[in-house]
Amino acid sequence: MALKKGDILDEFKRHQQSCGLVVKVMGGGEGFERIVCCGHDLTEEDLVPDAEIIRGRKKGSLPPAVVLDEKKLYQDSCGLRVMIIDGGAGFTEIRCCGHVLTASSMRDLQYGKMRGPEAGPAGTA
Ligand SMILES: [Zn+2]
Ligand SMILES: [Zn+2]
């Protein structure tokens, strides 16, 4: 399957007993496989027309509005970019183009960005 810009995935659509992760696609997504959250696989089955304001979403270590950018970690990727809208306490990873994007890899990236222009990632296997 593939995602496109503007797509919104809502974990609450199929899983009421979840953290209620909501993500919005900002770009890329041709190689999208799935998002793993709370032990669920979020796929095209979880697409919603709009991000609903539902109480009970549990925020995790990912702050809302943070953008996960596949291209910054993998140059040969489709460049999936997703924004965390809400929830995410159970967020595990995003699978895209055979890559695994986790919250910690994104955090490292943000720290690297703050260190300055010469802080290139070294030895990310
Ligand atoms: Zn979840
Ligand atoms: Zn991709």
Image (cartoon, helix red, strand yellow):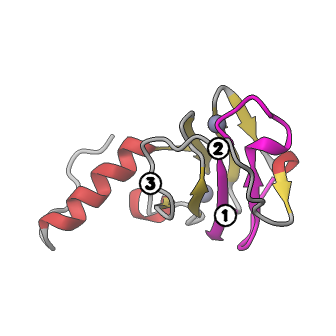
* Residue type (three-letter) at the residue carrying disc 2: Arg
* Residue type (three-letter) at the residue carrying disc 3: Pro
Asked whether residue 28 appears in the rendered view, the answer is no
Q: Which mark is residue 57?
A: 2
Which residue position is annotated with label 1?
A: 24
Cα separation, mark 2 vs mark 1, equals 16 Å
Residue 76 in percent (x, y) is at: 50, 61
Q: Quadrant of ligand 1?
A: top right
Nearer-the-camera pick, 94 or 54: 54
Q: Which quadrant of the figure contains the C terminus? A: top left
Q: Residue at x 60, y 64 (%)?
A: 78
> Is-magenta flag for residue 11?
yes
Q: Secondary structure at mark 3?
A: loop
User: How crowded is the residue under tag 2: few (<14 C-alpha within 10 Å), some, or many (20+)?
Assistant: many
Please identify, in this view, whether the residue under mark 2 or under mark 1 is nearer the observer: 2
* Residue type (three-letter) at the residue carrying disc 1: Lys
Q: Secondary structure at mark 1?
A: strand
Q: Residue at x 44, y 63 (%)?
A: 75
Disc 2 vs disc 1: Cβ atoms closer than 8 Å? no
Range of magenta residues: 1-29
The answer to whether residue 95 is left or right of residue 3 is left
The answer to whether residue 21 is left or right of residue 61 is right
Cα separation, mark 3 vs mark 2, equals 13 Å
Q: Which mark is residue 63?
A: 3
Whichever of labels 3 and 2 marks the residue nearer the N terminus, that label is 2
Q: Is mark 3 within 8 Å of ligand 1?
A: no
